[in-house]
Every structure is written in C-alpha cells, then in structure tokens.
Amino acid sequence: MPILTATYQPPIVMRNAHVATIYPNLFRHVNHLTQQRERLELNDGDFIDLDWSYASSYATNHLVIILHGLEGNAQRPYIKGLAKHLTSKDLDVVAVNLRNCSEQPNRIYASYHAGASEDLGHVIQHLSTKYAYDKISICGFSLGGNIVLKYLGETQDIPAAIVSAVAVSVPCDLYDSLRQIEKPANFIYRNRFVRHLKSKLFQRAGDFPDDISNEAIKACQSLLDIDDLYTSKAHGYKNAKEYYLKCSSKNFLSQIRIPTLLLNAKNDSFLGAACYPIAAAETNTSLFLEMPEYGGHVGFYDKKNLYYHERRAYEFISQFS
C-alpha cells in the first residue's frame, strides 16, 4: 500500500518535538467524559480493568478498544481525548488498563509489557462473546500500539467482528526505540520512566520478596536494566535483548490482514529509523503508514482540544463502520 500523505500542520511552537510531547501531558484536560469500570477476571488469577464510555445515541453497533502506553492508564488525556471524540461520533469505547496500571496492584508477579498480545486477546474474546457488537476496532498508543500490531500479525483466529485498527507513535522495533530514549536529549522522559517503573518494582519486591529484591531494583539505572531484571524474566524471556527481539511488532507487520493505520511522526524522539516500516507498508495492502513531519510522541496538537491523531483515527475507522 502506498505511504499515506499527511496533512498535519501544527502551530510553529508545536513543531518542536519536545514541546509537542510534553505539552499534552502537562496542560491538556479532557472534561465531560464518563467512564464506567468493568473488571475482567483472568484464568491465571489476575485481572484487567476496563473503562467504558458510551455513545450519546446508545444505539451503536461499533465498539473501539483503546490501549495506553508505557506507565499509562485509561485516565490519561490522550486516552480520554480519543474516547471523547469517538463517543461524540456514535461509537462506544472501552479503554483497557493493562495489568498493574489501574489503582489496584495486580495479583501475580507478572505484569504488562510491550508484547502482551495474549492479554489483548483475552479482552477481545471477552468483549466478543459477552456483548453484541457487530464491529470492533482497536486503537493503541506507543507500547499499546505495539501490542495491537503484534496481536493482529500473529493471531490466526481473529474474531470476525474486528474490522480495523489504528496505532499511534509505535516503537515497532523495541530495541531501536530503547536506544533513542537513552540518548541525552531524552533524559527527561528516560528518568521519568525509570523512576515510575522502579517505584512499581519496589512494590513487587514487597509482595514477592522471593522473586525480586530491593537491592537489585536500586541498582537499576536505565530501562535496559529494568527490562533485564524484571520485564524479560517475569514474562518468560532470557533477558532484555530476547524480549525486544521477540516482542517487536515489526516482526509481524507483513502478516496483518485487518485494515490498519500506523501514524508515526518523523520527529518523534522515541523512534529510530527501524520504527518506520516503509517496506512493510509498501508490500502489505492492509497496512497504511502515515508519517507527518511533526507530532512528537503522541503530541499531535490541533485546534479546539481535538488532536490530529483523534481526527485521523475516526476518519480511518469510519471507513469500516
């Protein structure tokens, strides 16, 4: 499929990648969105919390599933902004809080990670069997976008109700993205991620002292250290390098058969060259790649508190409604 031409032209100040990335996290507010929580109990004894928002018409037959990024949740402005726009267009929305990302810690040692496509599969199976939606679309941001792309490419028995997907600011090559985040220009993001993840790991150590120690957590100075210590081993990988290799969605893009929009800004400081899968998009008629010059990382600022990626997500999804 030819690469899509982007029309996004933000104000001059928002053409700076770091301003675009930081501004919505600090200053964006999304009001007048109601969320109702449902807890999905999993077969391994754990749970995933789902936050529902409903179309004003209450008569839609189309549901959109949204997945957040690293250390996010369903209350982040980028999740609520998309949910509010989609519900205003008569689509129901369920925003997934990945394991250990809602207010209550999850029950088992394992948590969420960039390759947790089986958890997305559990959510989709639950929604497909319990609710009578004729059509379901999936939207993922950053790490959540990697999960969506991996699920679509590796799953052989995708429910027939799944009709489209959108993935925004996705680190399609996890190691390539890690290398970018570790660069000096990204120290603010890196330090924030490390601080938040270590805080959760100290909680893990309190709950599972036989599996991880406070001393080992204190020694972690980077995302690579954390992925070597916990993320990889807690989820069945030998080390961080194997985790990055096996969970990167770029490995699964050629197998995607559901119409999928991948929106990655060219100035996203979290993404290196390997995160722009031009060759895969050119050879897969189901994969639509759009690469605006600007947008940072999930920072597609636009007028009236409606962001560009939200308009594009609806435009793409509406083609298959």
Image (cartoon, rainbow, N blue to C red):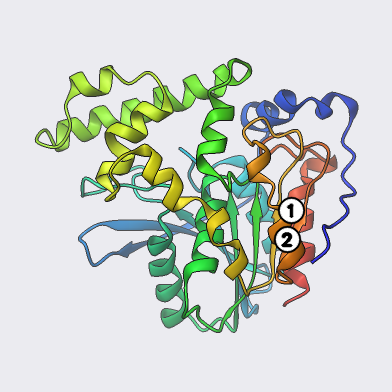
Amino acid type, residue under disc 1 in the picture: Ile
The quarter of the picture where the N terminus appears is bottom right
Up-down: is 178 above or below 36? above
Q: Crowding at label 2, few (<14), some or many (≥20) Cα neighbours within 10 Å?
A: many
Q: Is residue 119 above or below residue 308?
A: below
Q: Residue 281's mark?
A: 2
* Quarter of the image where the C terminus is located: bottom right
Residue 85, by quadrant, is bottom right
Report the amino acid beneath label 2.
Ala
Task: Kindly state the secondary structure of the residue where label 1 is placed.
Answer: helix
CB atoms of marks 2 and 1 within 8 Å: yes
Residue at 82% in and 40% down: 302
Query: Residue sitting at 50 percent across and 78 percent down?
Result: 158
Q: Which residue is mark 1?
A: 278
- On the question of residue 67 being in view, the answer is no
Question: How far apart, in angstroms, are the residues tagged by discs 2 and 1?
Answer: 5 Å
Residue 46 x/y as whole percent: 25, 57
Residue 91: x and y in percent read 66, 69
Residue in the picture at 48% in, 68% down: 154
Give how far across and how far down residue 178 sits, in percent: 52, 32
| Residue at left offset 9%, top offset 36% | 210
